[in-house]
């Protein structure tokens, strides 16, 4: 093996890509901007690594001995390589050529899902080349210099691509740090996590119930919901690749909780949708949130969550639960849920 260190670097970079990509997927506040910058730097570093690793790759593909000895493993290695290149290509295209979709899925959605699908192949590849992880390779001072060179190459390539896009006023210059593109028209897309259907809700019978670990559970109807005129300007950042900044009006969650009187030990709340969808918030996060009934001085449409949806400026779109019909106060923390919704 001509460059055993390259396997170690590839595994480390891909793991770093998955971690920073996950952080970008689950956070919408600017405090996490560094994670997305690192995600892009690591991606360019992987491209630079392929320049070094290409001699390994080409040598293996040309070797008749390798194909005779382990043809099936070679085939899986080619699939992994092709998958990584497609993931990187989709990320670059989305970041610099603008938004695009295929079969109803945005380019960034395909990019993310394909990356997660490659994890089993990546683990298999790591085990197959486990000799690369011997201490004499990992502790080699030259490998430390190579790692620094990769990091520098990734940084320079990233900055060059970003500045080129800005100077050329390309589509990528308009994207948010999360990678989402703006939707600034009079309306914005109607999207549902895991393809929930838009439910029919009769405003005459709809009630919002606040219960759980509270002293005084209660319900409100739609008239009481719409009486509140508390407004905030917040950005809805959808993981499908778009964002929109709107004026939302509704009731602060903190007011509803104060009325219910959380008991000692209350640690989180669960927001339930009429569809069965739910997300948990910590009590600190709920201080920033409102239960909105209007957007841009208009009542919510059914597709946007009528009669009530959560709005929390620091959360991604899948946490902005629509068609809310109950809020439950819990004596357990927000972490008692999947970090990304599974149902």
Image: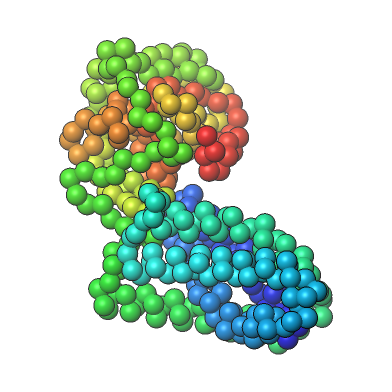
Residue 337 position, x and y percent, is: 58, 36
* Nearer to us in this view, 77 or 109: 77
Tell me: 144 left or right of 229.
right
21 relative to 297, above or below: below
Is residue 147 in view from this perspective?
A: yes
Locate residue 117, reporting x and y percent: 59, 55
Numbered label tally: 0
Q: Would you say residue 148 is visible in this rendering?
A: no
Image quadrant holding the N terminus, namely bottom right
Q: Is residue 110 left or right of residue 233?
A: right
Relative image position of residue 259 (x, y in whole percent): 40, 19
- Residue 7 position, x and y percent, is 69, 74
Which of the two residues, 114 or 312, is positioned nearer the viewer here? 114
**Displayed quadrant of residue 195:** top left
Q: How is the image coloured?
A: rainbow
In the image, residue 153 sits, relative to residue 313, either above or below, namely below
Q: Residue at x 39, y 38 (%)?
A: 192
Which residue is rendered at x = 60% and y = 35% of the image?
336
Relative to 158, 300 lies left or right: left
Side of 325 where 117 appears, left or right: right
Residue at 28% in and 67% down? 171
Which residue lies at the image location 27% right of the left edge and 17% below the top edge? 203
């Amino acid at each position: 093996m001509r460059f055993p260190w390259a396997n170690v670097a590839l595994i480390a970079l891909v793991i770093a890509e998955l971690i920073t990509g996950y952080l970008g997927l689950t956070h919408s506040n600017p405090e996490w901007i560094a994670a997305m910058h690192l995600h892009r730097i690591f991606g360019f570093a992987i491209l630079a690594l392929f320049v070094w690793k290409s001699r390994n790759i080409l040598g293996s593909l040309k070797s008749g001995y390798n194909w005779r000895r382990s043809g099936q493993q070679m085939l899986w290695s080619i699939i992994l390589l092709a998958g990584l290149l497609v993931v990187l290509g989709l990320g670059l295209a989305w970041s610099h050529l603008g938004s695009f979709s295929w079969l109803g899925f945005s380019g960034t959605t395909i990019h993310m899902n394909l990356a997660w699908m490659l994890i089993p192949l990546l683990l298999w590849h790591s085990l197959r080349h486990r000799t690369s992880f011997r201490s004499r390779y990992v502790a080699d001072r030259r490998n430390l210099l190579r790692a620094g060179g990769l990091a520098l190459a990734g940084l320079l390539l990233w900055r060059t691509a970003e500045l080129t896009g800005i100077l050329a006023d390309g589509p990528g210059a308009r994207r948010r740090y999360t990678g989402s593109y703006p939707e600034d028209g009079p309306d914005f897309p109607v999207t549902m996590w895991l393809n929930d259907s838009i439910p029919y809700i009769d405003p005459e019978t709809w009630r919002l119930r606040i219960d759980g670990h509270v002293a005084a559970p209660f319900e409100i109807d739609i008239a009481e919901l719409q009486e509140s005129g508390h407004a905030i300007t917040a950005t809805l950042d959808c993981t499908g690749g778009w964002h929109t900044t709107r004026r939302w009006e509704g009731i602060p969650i903190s007011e509803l909780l104060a009325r219910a009187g959380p008991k000692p030990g209350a640690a989180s709340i669960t927001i339930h949708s009429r569809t069965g969808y739910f997300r948990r918030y910590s009590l600190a996060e709920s201080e920033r949130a409102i239960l909105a009934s209007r957007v841009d001085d208009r009542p919510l449409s059914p597709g946007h969550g009528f009669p009530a949806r959560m709005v929390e400026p620091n959360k991604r779109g899948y946490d902005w639960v629509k068609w809310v019909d109950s809020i439950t106060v819990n004596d357990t923390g927000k972490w008692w849920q999947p970090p990304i919704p599974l149902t």
